[in-house]
Amino acid sequence: MLESMTPVDPLGEALHFLRMSGTFYCRSELTAPWTVALPAMENCLMLHVVTSGECRLEVGESAPLLLRTGDLALVPHGEGHRMGCGAGALPVQLFDLPRELVKDRYEILRYGGGGAATTMICGAVRFDDAAAQRLLEALPRVIRVDAWESPEKEWLQSTLRLIVSEAQELRAGGETIITRLADILVVQAIRSWIASDPAAQTGWLGALRDRQIGRAIALIHRDPARHWTVELLARQVGMSRSAFAARFTQRVGEPAMQYVARWKMHAAEAWLKDEATPLSELASRVGYESEAAFSRAFKRFAGVSPGSVRRSSFREIRIKPALQ
């Protein structure tokens, strides 16, 4: 029997999980010529908002991307990249430049050759939630949003103007306003790409848009403790077992039960890093009747014990695709 078919927005739910942690922002005041090399930051998303002037963004061997006032760009996978304006400036490593620490999450960088000015808000953001990580994996190397051409241009422009105002004056609480607004811009940039890029219509993101497969994914995400089976998931979304199994594999790229098992472990990994919950309780959250059974399953996926992840929470221990 089908459970309540309350309207479900799996894509919206995935965006909801984009709750940021380890966020750090920098106001950059730069004058041409300048070139700054940003190091790779594993499992971080990097944000650049040009509040005045212009600059080029280079990621890997890709062609430089010109960013002008009102543009925002994301580098979702934490790749090292370069930013600059003007010719002749040798690249300088970001962490070799002096910076003024204003607050724990906010600093100011001033650098350049004294020519044309560019100001930016730049940031590094981490997402620990399993759904957020899966969403980020689906994103391209760079996302650019033009605030002057976007369908949401009015509020984007208003948001950018407020960021500019706060960055210039830095009144009491200004860094808090800037970081909160920048958080919103990160989510909006991702929404904009999903709405406009054909690549977002395929793979896991495309599966979220499928009325029945997307609902099944949402059910798995909401209740990792449940003992899901192909038959149960198919019944919940009104499909036959065989049709559901085939369509899930085709849309998601892996069988339903493999996805369920992997999801439980991703959720457990996020909780291990973020909470001090006893392992016995955490095991119950992902549907295991004992801590020992959970620990064995987790080690098969991650290659390390749950306790090791908890003790090493400041390092990223990526779950290995052991079921592939």
Image: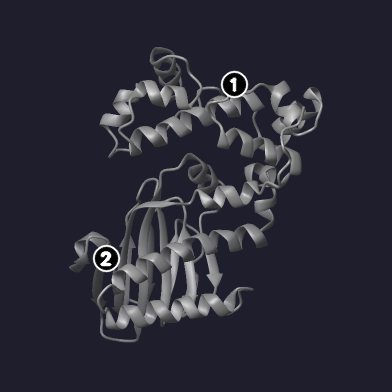
Residue 42, x across and y down, in percent: 37, 46
Residue type beneath disc 2: Tyr
Q: Calculate the distance from the C-alpha at mark 2 to the C-alpha at mark 1.
A: 44 Å
98 to the left or right of 15: left
Q: Residues within 10 Å of mark 2 (few under 14, many from 20)?
A: many
CB atoms of marks 2 and 1 within 8 Å: no
Q: Quadrant of residue 299?
A: top left
Going 50% across and 23% down the picture, which residue do you hit?
322
Q: Which mark is residue 46?
A: none
Q: In which quadrant of the rendered image does the N terminus lie?
A: top right
**Colouring rule applied to residues:** one colour
Q: In which quadrant of the rendered image does the C terminus lie?
A: top right
* For residue 224, above or below residue 19: above
Residue 130, x across and y down, in percent: 48, 39
47 to the left or right of 131: left
Going 70% across and 24% down the picture, which residue do you hit?
232
List the residue tagged with mark 1: 227
> At numbered mark 1, what does the secondary structure look like: helix, strand or loop?
loop
Q: Quadrant of residue 224?
A: top right
Residue 22, x across and y down, in percent: 32, 52
Of residues 96 and 62, the one drawn nearer to the viewer in this rendering:
96
Of residues 309 and 202, the one drawn nearer to the viewer in this rendering:
309
Q: Which mark is residue 106?
A: 2
Residue type beneath disc 1: His
Residue 141, x across and y down, in percent: 51, 54
